Amino acid sequence: MAQEHGGGASTRWSPRPWTPVDVPARQCRVRGSTFSYTELGRGIPLLALSGSPGDARQTLAAFEPAFVGRTGWRRLHLDLPGQGRTPGPDWIRTYDDVLQAVVEFLDEVVGDQPVAVAGISYGSTLATALRHGHPERVLATLQLSPANDVEPDGLSTPVVREDTGFREALTEDERPFLDLFKVRTRTVLEEIRAWTMPGVASCDVAFLDRLDQGPRFSHVDEPLRSFDGPGLIIVGRQDPGGHHRLVDQLDLMPRTTLAVLDRAGHLAFAEQSRLVDVLVTEWLDRVEEHLEQTRAARL
């Protein structure tokens, strides 16, 4: 059996080093609509936003390994409107409406306390929109596999590895996503099956299609604002969204690390899971250090 490099010791899949068992979803009301989220820990609030389609299971898989043995953080993994157990209400008709819904969710659950925001793909775009439109609400950002809102068709990027039988192992529901896999191994497939495909199956397709037919986030057409908080951007070298646009943004984000990972496409959290865990852990360290220094300066 072939050995996997960077994604596990062998092609046999093993669960991530955490098990979110017996953690019931919480709910809050936003303009009469029920928003579902998973809450873990106490302390610095972190809002985790998944890709689309997807749900909180994806952010749990991507970010929670970095919290094993770490205390002092209150993680809020949100099912975004139309995804997971959060319905797509009629009053949300554009992506800017989704952003406003996230702001009102924070009002209900966190109050006016600034939060760290960690997003994957679509969730990463939301993190940027929140940082741009409501800078007072954001103390740090983590963007994993950020979506390309400038050139949505993306680039043609190579497949790094494809194991024998990978395509045949795909289900009918998984085959439309084949081009997203740049590391085609059983380990990566099982990660996506466990943490992303359930969210795909549960999403409100009609609601998400309606959003896609509307305007883009308004911040995409405006000059990017500077951000001095601790930041982390992780993008796969083989991500069809590319990474050059992200390099151009770094001068406006002096405390942000940009990590471009070989052997990873848009599914970087599954294709380079160990490296993602290390980078997320280091970002959490920097956020804690930043808060300590900010408090000390006020004394």
Image: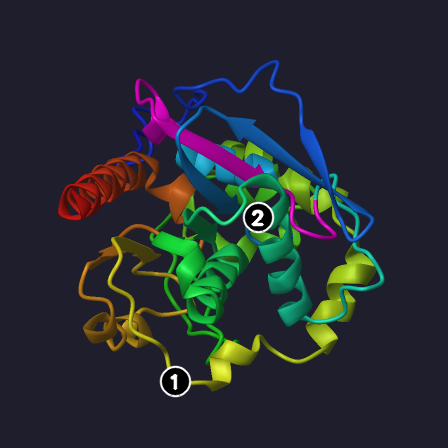
Front one among 295 and 204: 295
Q: Amino acid at mark 1?
A: Pro
Report the disc number at residue 106. Answer: 2
Say which mark, if any, is on residue 223.
1
User: The N terminus lies in which quarter of the figure?
Assistant: top left
Q: Is residue 186 above or below residue 34?
A: above
- Between 139 and 237, the one nearer to me in the picture: 139
For the residue labelled by badge 2, is the local secondary structure a helix, a strand or a loop? helix
Q: Which residues are magenta?
A: 65-83
Where residue 46 appears, as percent x and y from the top left, is 43, 41
Which callout, 1 or 2, points at the residue further toward the start of the chain?
2
Q: Residue 264: say if magenta.
A: no
Residue 293 lies in what quarter of the image?
top left
At 41% from the left and 53% from the top, the residue drawn is 182
Residue 278, placed above or below residue 54: above
Q: Quadrant of residue 14?
A: top left
Q: Can you see residue 265?
A: no
Say which quarter of the image contains residue 194.
top right
The CA distance from mark 1 to mark 2 is 25 Å
Decide: is 68 above or below 296: above
Q: Residue at x 78, y 53 (%)?
A: 31
Q: Nearer the viewer, residue 293 or 127?
A: 293
Q: Is residue 74 magenta?
A: yes
Q: Is residue 86 visible?
A: yes
* Element type at mark 1: loop
| Residue farthest along the top direction in this orientation | 22
